[in-house]
Image (tube, rainbow, N blue to C red):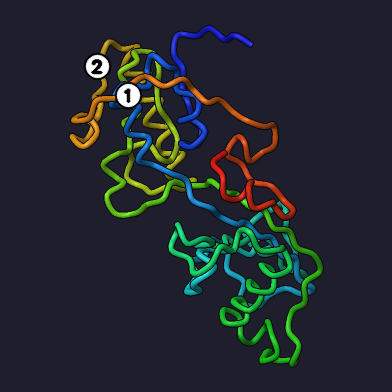
Amino acid sequence: TKVTADYYVTAMPVDVLKRLIPQPWSAMPYFRQLDELEGIPVINIQIWLDRKLKQSEDGLCFSRSPLLSVYADMSTCCEEYASDENSMLELVFAPCSKIAGGDRNWIAEPDDVIIDATMKELERLFPTEIGPASDDGKGAQIVKSSVVRVPRSVYAATPGRNKFRPSQASPINNFVMAGDFASQKYLGSMEGAVLSGKLAAEVICDKVAGRVPEIRAVHHSVTSEEAKKKTPVGIIGTNPIAFGGGQQHSLNKNAVSSHP
């Protein structure tokens, strides 16, 4: 399908975008700096419990667990899952690989191993409601669960990466960069993606109004090197992972370790 427009905005994950950069653009420092950004694995978990947790908070909670970065009781903070009788926990299991600072490659583990590890961590977070130390000696039990693996999620915020994040304005006059990896005050996140989208919209408004948006300078470590144009690899496959998304059920090791 061919689409013709005045302006084009990309909001693709950085690992997917890098596979689609047109050959004439590929040697430009603005696009070459994307090679310094790489998505990391993340596991999203949903757990339905047989009771309502009394310590349920209305909002996203940051965790002191080394495995669960954030979590929320959707039965309390989301109308779609609202319930006074059963909690539904949404959790981000990260870091889940050594590249992201984890102690093992959790994303390659079977679902039951990941769920068991998650419940062990929840015992620490809800000691009176989950696990053998709970008030009734048994604690909340799992009714059902799902594990969604995202092999290439938000970019790895390792030291020195921030200087390679591109501005929303690009050297291509009618091409605008959005996405949480683009330059803005947040790290890779939903909040960062929303802010990046707003900044991308501002770039278009500036151009329409005749103002010249600023293109962030590319770091000298990129501009100082010669580069040849590269033919885009393109998207391989049709599953969600190929487009930067997540997928349920266990992945084979090749799917887990390879770039989408």
Query: What's the residue type where badge 1 is placed?
Result: Ala
Disc 2 secondary structure class: loop
Q: Which residue is labeled 2 in the image? A: 212
Q: Which residue is labeled 1 in the image? A: 169
Other-residue count near label 1 (Cα within 10 Å), few / some / many at <14 / 14–19 / ≥20: many
In depth, the one of 124 and 259 nearer the eye is 259
Please state the horizontal and vertical placement of residue 136, each as a whole percent of the image: 75, 91
Residue 54 marker = none
Residue lying at 81% horizontally and 69% vertically, measured from the top left: 143
- Left or right of 172, for residue 179: right
Disc 1 secondary structure class: loop
- Left or right of 28, for residue 83: right
Residue lying at 34% horizontally and 54% vertically, measured from the top left: 158
- Quarter of the image where one finds residue 214: top left
Residue 157 vertical placement versus 119 (above, below): above
Which comes sooner in the sequence, label 1 or label 2?
1
